[in-house]
Image (cartoon, rainbow, N blue to C red):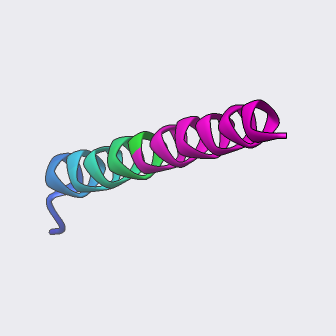
Amino acid sequence: MPDFEEMYYTLMRASEEALRIMIEAQKECEEMYVSNDENE
């Protein structure tokens, strides 16, 4: 029988990591946008 608990935690860890990566990318883009405005 599959270990559903381990499957769940594996999926949740990957989801958390994906969300962290997306938040970091958004912050980087916001910083790029703000710094571009300052240069003009």
Could you say which is closer to the camera, residue 12 or residue 35? Answer: 35
Residue pushed farthest bottom?
Answer: 1
22 shown above or below 31: below
Is residue 36 part of the magenta span, yes or no?
yes
34 shown above or below 33: above
* Numbered circles on residues, count: 0
- Image location (x, y in percent) of residue 7: 24, 58
Q: Which region is colored magenta?
A: 21-40
- Image location (x, y in percent) of residue 9: 22, 45
Tell me what residue is drawn at x 15 percent, y 69 percent. 1
Q: Is residue 32 left or right of residue 20?
A: right
The kind of secondary structure the magenta stretch mainly shows is helix
Tell me what residue is drawn at x 71 percent, y 31 percent. 34
- Image location (x, y in percent) of residue 15: 41, 48
Is residue 34 part of the magenta span, yes or no?
yes
Based on the displayed image, in which of its 4 quarters is residue 37 positioned? top right
